[in-house]
Image (cartoon, rainbow, N blue to C red):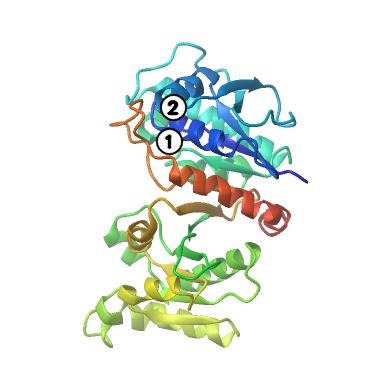
Amino acid sequence: MARPVLAVTLGDPVGIGPEITARTLAAVAGEDGHHGVAVGDTEALRRGARAAGVDAEVREVTDFSVEPAGPGVIDVLDTGVLGTDLPAWGTVDGRAGRAAVTAIETATRAAMAGEVAGVVTGPINKEAIWEAGSKHLGHTEMLGELTGVTRQDTMFVVRNTAVAGHHLRIFFTTRHVALRKALDQLTAERVRNSIDEALTALRVFGTDRPRLAVAAVNPHGGENGAFGDEEIEHIAPACEAARADGLDVTGPVPADSVFHQGLTGRYDGVLSHFHDQGHIPAKTYDFDGTISVTVGLPILRTSVDHGTAFDIAGSGRADHATMLSAYRAAVDYSPYAPAIRATYG
């Protein structure tokens, strides 16, 4: 589409999602080349705008094709779950969970139908969506069911690196499991598959000849088995197999240096092997600028990389920087929507 329309879900309506969505959409209102439309309960967004001190009109729209009104106007597609009866800020509430799920469903259907170029998701509360009857662990699993995809992966994008124009992408061999289980799941086959998935994602998102580094898991890369044998038994064989296939893969690289090397431009992507191995360096280096992209879906989806922050919800203290980064990343990546659909559809 000539001007990409992006669906921005509020997340949990009693968390900080409505506040950061209001601030983000107010900040970009009137910019040429894109149109962000909030998806959720209108009154929840209005309450969030008031809490955040956003001086903008919240305009209710009935579809995503409406023309933007310009500066000072935030558009919202009302999902009609809560009406004016909003739960209290910062509480786990099944109604709020249902509102969050409905917004995700609405935005995803629109992306699948080509009505929007992509989806930007606000943070949800897992307990609340479970109270609402959802059986999913979170966004990723829910989006997989909605799009008919059985496997998705997370790609962290660190946009503000030490090299102008260079974005570092971080991938994960395992996801939300205990560290002990993550190490048990580390096999040569799994690492090799993760290498292929990471390289595919890098190509889909515009890197023609991607350079991927594969992290080690043990100190100093295991020191030839002195500190662990995961590198010898699993990671190195997977890297060697990838190189034998002509792929630009380096590893295993000690984890205490590989992310620095990626941030300074040596690699386009880093494959980490467990949740915190990739999250900690990204969030420490650039918490506000790091965003999450779900790869493997037939739609473009970016997201904040933080939670609902119930402790400050409604106080006006929530920082919208990560949501704004996720939105701008979706604008940047919207030209790749056809390639995303063709690759993962």
Mark number displayed over residue 97: 2
Viewer-nearest residue: 231 or 316: 316
Residue 134 location in percent, x, y? 46, 32
In this view of the protein, can residue 10 be seen by the observer?
no
Q: Is residue 268 above or below residue 281?
A: below
Q: Residue at x 43, y 64 (%)?
A: 173
Q: Is residue 126 above or below residue 290?
A: above
In this view of the protein, can residue 28 be seen by the observer?
yes
Quadrant in which residue 62 is drawn: top right
Q: Amino acid at mark 2?
A: Gly
Count of numbered circles on the image? 2
Q: Residue at x 68, y 56 (%)?
A: 336
In the picture as drawn, the residue positioned furthest to the right comes out as 2
Left or right of 99 on screen, residue 116: right
Q: Amino acid at mark 1?
A: Ile
Circle 2 Cα neighbour tier, 10 Å, few/some/many (<14 / 14–19 / ≥20): many
Viewer-nearest residue: 295 or 161: 161
Task: Using the numbered discs, state the Cα–Cα distance from disc 2 to disc 1 in whole angstroms.
Answer: 8 Å
Residue 102 location in percent, x, y? 55, 28
Find disc 1 in the rendering and name its residue. 124
Badge 2 element: helix
Give the mark nearest the N terminus, 2 or 1.
2
Viewer-nearest residue: 316 or 169: 316
Quadrant holding the N terminus: top right
Tag 2–tag 1 contact (CB < 8 Å): yes
Left or right of 250 on screen, residue 332: right
